[in-house]
Image (tube, rainbow, N blue to C red):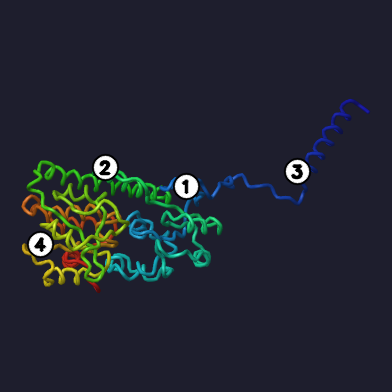
Amino acid sequence: MHKTGRLLLSTLLIILLVCSICGCSKDTQPTSKSSPPSVSAARQVVDMAGRTVTVPTNPKKVATMQGPTYELLFMLGTKDQIGLVRSDHQTAYPLALLTNPDLKNYPAIDGVGPQSPVNVEEFINNKVDLVVYWNIAKELEKFDNAGIPAAVIVATGSKPNNMEEALAGTKKQISFLAELLGGNAPQRYTEWEKYMNKTVDTIKSRTATISEDKRPIVYWGNTWNTNILSTYPLNPRLYETALCGGKLVSVEKGGQFPEITKEQLIAWNPEVIIVDNHGHSPEKIIEDLKTNADWATLRAVKDNRIYRIPAGVFFLDKGTSQPLYYYWLAKQLHPDLFKDIDLIKEMTYYYKTFYNYDLKTEEAEKVIAGWVEGI
């Protein structure tokens, strides 16, 4: 055979061999050059508990179980990524519904809490692709076994030693969540961080030089029925109160809500009592403080310095609305020093900026007044 013919035959045989290996045929359509390359829909992160978790790159249905997670997603501009909420979060916070009426229509789950066992089937049925949960190993394992990513956003075990460390811990939690959510959430976090820093700097510039004898003694009581003796451990609220010009009294240990004795509260004799909304009975607590003879000797009672924390999309002193709480507390402890701070103006700005809601003046007044049902 002619040399040129042999070369052509060899080339043809090679082409046929390659086509047979690749599965080519005249009926096979080539891949479009415009088709995007395959990209993994998941990535690995290390959550606030130090766990390596594989999470969706762009989560679409987030189960907001732990504490203020719903409010955090709302503030970060990702409410459309919420796939499951706690049913009590749909009803317990009037401002949550006021600022986002769609909340009542979200898929919801009952009986969720740090002491409640997880029913994984409910999460599977709601097709969630990310769960924000407490750092409870046995419950997190259930999500792992079901193939549902679960992330912890609240660090445990370490306690801040000053306000800077406490603030850094809060920022780290919200920043981590923003990175988990993706999209515009990190940008929203940056905007919020600037507001928080400005608030803290404003307050600190006025309270840093207040002498110890001018700082009122503050007690912080929770609100289960009329039990004012349920409180918080000192850390980190000690530093928040100090920032606002007060001296917090409490215990070092005792769980999330340690309980003190009546004798201890009388011995502390606080000048200011802050009434929390956590137990949802602030009116009962305040009425009991004012009418129960057990408390008649307390300076806070005699001077009528009993202050109920304002309302919030979640609790005002938790989640992302903490800067509003700091302004509020500073005004209660040192009204003359902060008389130029207009709480209604600050709240109106905050709700517009971070919740995209135009808070009316009368609504802001109700917010400051406390937990107003049917607001």
Mark 4 or 2: the one toward you: 4
Q: Amino acid at mark 1?
A: Arg
- Callout 4 amino acid: Leu
Give the mark nearest the N terminus, 1 or 2. 1
Residue closest to the far front: 263
Direction from residue 119 to residue 7 in the image, left or right: right
Q: Amino acid at mark 2?
A: Asn
Query: Considering only vertical position in the picture, is 361 above or below 140?
Result: below
Quarter of the figure that contains the C terminus: bottom left
Residue 84 image offset from top left, x and y in percent: 43, 64
Which residue lies under the disc numbered 2?
161
Mark 4 or 2 closer to N-term?
A: 2
| Disc 1: which residue | 51
Between the residue at mark 4 and the residue at mark 3, the CA separation in whole angstroms equals: 87 Å
Give the SS element for disc 1: loop
Label drawn at residue 298: 4
Cα–Cα gap, marks 3 and 1: 43 Å
In primary-sequence order, the first of circles 2 and 3 is 3
- Nearer to us of marks 4 and 1 is 4
Left or right of 121: which side holds 312? left
Tell me whether the residue at label 3 lies in contact with that at label 1, contact meaning CB atoms closer than 8 angstroms. no
**Separation (CA) of disc 1 from disc 2:** 25 Å
